[in-house]
Image (cartoon, rainbow, N blue to C red):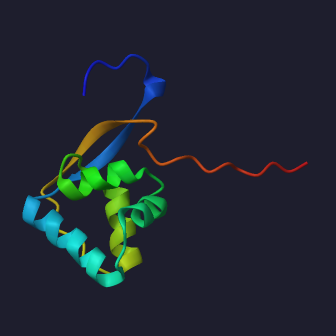
Amino acid sequence: MGILRTREEYLPVTCAILKPEDRDAFFSAIKKQSNSRPDAIARLCETTTEMVNDWISGKSNVPYHSLQTLAHQFQVSMPPVGELRREYQSISQAPSRRETPTFG
C-alpha cells in the first residue's frame, strides 16, 4: 500500500480474506437475490462504486462489517472467512462518518 504520509489519510479496517470461489458465489447470490448493481451496493455500504467493483473482482478485500451488512440486507449466507486482516484504506474509500446533529 505504500508509506503512510499522515495518519489522517488512511483508516485501519478489519477485512475478510475470502477464497475467490467463495467471493464469487457471495456476490452472485447478492446479484441474483436483488438484481443489485455495484452503485446500489456502494450506497448501502457507504463507499464508492469503484471500491465495490474491486471487492467483486478480488482486487481489494471486503471490510468485515460491509460483508455482514450485505449478508443481512440481501438475506444471503456469509461466505467462509479464511482470516481477518487489519488493512489501511484511503479515507476517500472508507465509509463516511455521519454527521451528528447539534442541539441548540
The answer to whether residue 80 is visible is: no
The number of numbered discs placed on residues in the rendered structure image is 0
Q: Is residue 28 above or below residue 88?
A: below
Farthest residue to the right: give it. Answer: 104
Q: Position of residue 62 (x, y in %)?
A: 28, 53
Q: Nearer the viewer, residue 59 or 88?
A: 59
Q: Position of residue 16 (x, y in %)?
A: 23, 54
Q: Is residue 56 above or below residue 69?
A: above
Q: What is the quadrant of the N terminus in the image?
A: top left
**Which quadrant would residue 73 be assigned to in this image?**
bottom left
**Which quadrant would residue 89 be assigned to in this image?**
top left
Q: Position of residue 3 (x, y in %)?
A: 29, 18
User: At 27% across and 41% down in the image, what residue appears?
Assistant: 86
User: At 23% across and 49% down in the image, what residue appears?
Assistant: 61
The answer to whether residue 39 is visible is: yes
Q: Position of residue 4 (x, y in %)?
A: 34, 20
Q: Nearer the viewer, residue 91 or 104?
A: 91
User: At 36% across and 81% down in the image, what residue appears?
Assistant: 34
Q: Nearer the viewer, residue 83 or 40?
A: 40
**Left or right, residue 67 beside residue 25:** right
Q: Is residue 52 above or below residue 33?
A: above
